[in-house]
Image: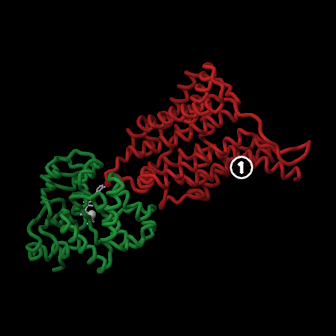
Chain colours: A green, B red
Amino acid sequence: MLVLEDVHTHYGKIEALHGVSVEVKKGEIVSLIGANGAGKTTLLMTVCGNPQATSGRVILQGRDITRDLTSNIMRSGISIVPEGRRVFSGLTVEENLHMGGFFNTKSEIRKSQEHVYELFPRLKEREHQRAGTMSGGEQQMLAIGRALMSKPNMIILDEPSLGLAPLVIKQIFEIIGKLREEGITVFLVEQNAHQALNLADRGYVLETGRIRLHDTGKNLLANPDVQNAYLGG
Amino acid sequence: MSEASLYFIQQLVNGLTIGSTYALIAIGYTMVYGIIGMINFAHGEIYMIGAYTALIAITGLATLGVSWLPLILIVALVCAVIVSSAMGWAVERAAYRPVRGRHRLIPLISAIGMSIFLQNYVHLAQGSRNIGFPLMIQGGFDFGGDDTFRGSISYMQMTIFVTTLICMTALSLFISRSRIGRACRAVSQDLGMANLLGIDTNRIIAATFVIGAALAAVAGLLLGMYYGSIDPLFGFIAGLKAFTAAVLGGIGSIPGAMLGGLILGVSESMTSGYISGAYKDVVSFGLLILILLFKPTGLLGKPEVEKI
Ligand SMILES: Nc1ncnc2c1ncn2[C@@H]1O[C@H](COP(=O)(O)OP(=O)(O)OP(=O)(O)O)[C@@H](O)[C@H]1O
Ligand SMILES: [Mg+2]
């Protein structure tokens, strides 16, 4: 589904990814964990083409997208729940969802919207409320709902649990599990390593722009290095 | 009604007339600013070119022997809107897109260059003297007063009100209800995120330039007819006034631009009526300075929440 081959990414002259190779297969949940500043967001954003990789290749569903424009990449069956949620705060919940389904027909939008409201009944209650006035958890649900509106094959999530209460985090992880059941491939970045690896088929550990480890979720959970560094010993 | 209150109402009517055209032009500044955070310094020239295009169309129809007024007005309006919209699009492509994301001064200089180019182009093509604009809508009706003093509203003023009202209503509906209008609002809040949803943000940006230019063209035709003459510097002062109106109302806010235009128009006509016409620009730019000093976000500006 998604393959990164020896990807290097720069911000100006500074290299943030030093040759990263990652594969996410169809139907999998793959978690990427790593400390602050390791380059997790950079890796996800490189997939989206903003910033573009300076060398190496990014392949999505068999197609080389390394040099594609962000807007084209994001219309080819992939969607993102970005770091910090980035809901459109002045738009209502419903308008935010419609932005997610921008390229779909009216009837497709209606169907996707119903589906999102089934997953997150809370969003239906808040349909006409401005997104900026909702709680952090509700905004996170909206960001996920918005990403689902385009009926993606693959969804990328950047720290969806950040700053949320444990109960909401649990709910978010349940939803991510449900997405897999619907056949959506999930690429998840998390600092919440325990839950992320528990849910994942496979996981990668990113350290200062390099992949240190990759293995099944279970094996990584049991790995003493991972336990020391990311699971609080 | 006493003469004093009639006089006041007369000034109010005159002020609202001019103010509503300022508002039409101000929309262009505010929408572009709301989306890319830059001032379109060539906007006054786009408005001026709209007025010239309308005049050329009117003259052309006259030589063809067309004399039915509604047809003349509609053709002039359509031509002005098309040419100005194309100019708005071209200005974005030529002066803004290539330098977007650079240091803020670069697009500023590029836009000022564009404005000087357009002004001088019109100087060359149309001459620098002012040209008479046919006064096609004449007459009006009087109200109140007696033989010595009457208030009057001309049909031209009413045309300006009604046209502006239609344009503003259409724009508000477009922004609040349509798919592209929603995308404009989304892009103005978080351009990068809109891009991450697959939206070609360049096209949305171009659309805001085009919408602003189309409204400026409408104002160009209206004010050309109202004043009865145009010249290549026609856009400069009106552009400054409309920019002031946009800042007054809160740059980035569409209702702000509407309100700012009306307030500015009314304060100018009150100054002309009660003090002296010579002071009206002093009052406008004085207002600009005051608002920048005491409330830089303008009357309705909420820069963080909703810029459009
Ligand atoms: N826009 C940018 N310009 C310059 N450097 C950047 C930019 N974004 C990130 N970096 C740098 O790239 C490195 C990786 O950052 P990144 O945001 O990808 O880390 P992260 O793993 O997502 O961290 P966090 O867990 O805090 O979100 C950091 O050193 C960061 O300072
Ligand atoms: Mg990050």
Q: Residue at x 40, y 73 (%)?
A: A135
- Residue A84 in sight in this render: no
Q: Is residue A82 left or right of residue B65?
A: left
Q: How many marks?
A: 1
B88 versus B245 height, above or below = above
Name the chain under label 1: B
Determine the residue positioned at 42% across, 68% down: A127
In-image side of B91 versus B195 (left or right): right
Q: Residue at x 54, y 34 (%)?
A: B78
- Provide residue A115's location: percent of width, then percent of height: 30, 66
Left or right side of A93 for A178: left
| Residue A188 picture quarter | bottom left
Q: Give above or below for A82 relative to A194.
A: above
Q: Residues within 10 Å of mark 1 (few under 14, many from 20)?
A: many
Instruction: Residue B217 in the image: state x and y as whole percent.
Output: 56, 37
The answer to whether one can see residue B228 in this image is yes
Please say if A141 is above or below B169. Answer: below
> What residue is at 91 percent from the left and 42 percent from the top?
B148
Q: Is residue B139 left or right of residue A225?
A: right
Q: Which residue is mark 1?
A: B266
Secondary structure at badge 1 equals: helix
Q: Residue B182 lies in what quarter of the image?
A: bottom left
The answer to whether the beta carbon of the residue marked 1 is less than 8 Å from any atom of ligand 1 is no
Residue B94: image x %, image y %? 42, 34
- Which is more toward the observer, A20 or B178? B178
Q: Nearer the viewer, residue A209 or B148?
A: B148
Where's ligand 2: which quadrant? bottom left
Kind of residue indicated by mark 1: Val
Q: Position of residue A30 (x, y in %)?
A: 16, 65
